[in-house]
Amino acid sequence: MKDTTKVEVENYITKVNNHLVSYLSGKPSELYQASTHYLKSGGKRLRPIMVIKSCEMFGGNQQDALPAASAVEFIHNFSLVHDDIMDNDDQRHGIPTVHKAFGLPLAILSGDILFSKAFQILSTTTVNSIKDSSLLSMVRKLSSACVDICEGQAKDIQFSQRQNFPSEEEYMDMISKKTAALFNVSCSLGALSSRNATEIDVNNMSDFGKNSGIAFQLIDDLIGIAGHSKQTGKAVGNDIREGKKTYPILLSIKKASELERSHILEVFGKGHCDTFSLKKAIDVISSLQIEEIVRKKAMDYSEKARKALINYEDSDPKKILQELSNYIVKRSK
């Protein structure tokens, strides 16, 4: 991102963070400490920023967008808490996962409170500024996105339980639900928050969000193999150790020779494999030029996202959305 955009985005992140934490307070205090555990550890806040900028594209302002921006970030954090429980992960963002820090029962409840607060904030703080039909549409879209996220997660679990690897089509369908659905709804809720967007505008913003979300997950998959632990907060080659059937690993198995495939499968899903064998598998994947292929595919989706905005006049919000889509593809953490 350009320096001016980066400064503006960081300012938004601070305001969003303050709004998120202020809305998560109550008794018992341990429940709310658990629910804000990830929120207070940092994060890119891509989804809420997309809500705000999508709102501003159609004449709305930050205050109009904050309830929807907070709602999508609560849903995102809810999904992280429950994902970490299902995967039994020890760390996220370089800190202990919620269930490791607070125990399993409180972690489940913290995810539940985040889910509930998302709909509470959306339905109670926007009533005075958004007409009922738009508010109903926002609630409907967010609830549909939550259904998609759950279905996508269930598909991901099914992949892990199968002996064979999913097809590329199956995998793209899964991430379209598990990850892209929340990017999709972020942009459509932002447009609706403006009170000026037409149905066509909302659909265009949905397309922008969906394609940006797919690009985001593809790069996330890549980072899960080749990312540096100091940047990602996770162990090097984490997805290989955990046996995650992500797109880069799927491609690697497909492209590799029999010998190369054996090096990958030797450590795939072996959580406590030795460092030498893991490095060998990562080197094999690197030699197959998987990073170039995945980044090219992510760039294709990012380009589709930008095309969804092509008919709109140039503006600062549009420029920042386009830069965010570009950043998603180029990031390394």
Image: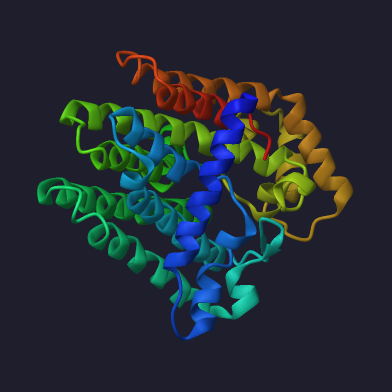
Image quarter where the C terminus lies is: top right
Image quarter where the N terminus lies is: top right
| Residue 182, quarter of picture | top left
Q: Is residue 210 left or right of residue 17?
A: left
Q: Residue at x 77, y 42 (%)?
A: 228
Q: Residue at x 42, y 27 (%)?
A: 317
Where residue 288 sits in the image (x, y, percent)? Answer: 71, 24
| Residue 185, quarter of picture | top left
Query: Is 8 above or below relative to 177?
Result: above
Q: Is residue 116 visible?
A: yes
Where residue 327 sits in the image (x, y, percent)? Answer: 58, 28
Query: Is 3 above or below relative to 274?
Result: above
Q: Nearer the viewer, residue 168 or 81?
A: 81
Q: Nearer the viewer, residue 2 or 286?
A: 2
Q: Residue at x 40, y 72 (%)?
A: 113
Q: Residue furthest right?
A: 276
Where residue 37 sits in the image (x, y, percent)? Answer: 58, 67
Q: How is the image coloured?
A: rainbow
Where residue 133 sits in the image (x, y, percent)? Answer: 10, 47
- In this rendering, the count of numbered labels is 0
Q: Residue furthest left?
A: 133
Q: Residue at x 40, y 19 (%)?
A: 315
Q: Is residue 244 left or right of residue 159?
A: right
Q: Is residue 248 left or right of residue 217?
A: right
Q: Is residue 162 visible?
A: no
Q: Nearer the viewer, residue 264 or 68?
A: 68
Query: Is 231 above or below relative to 311?
Result: below
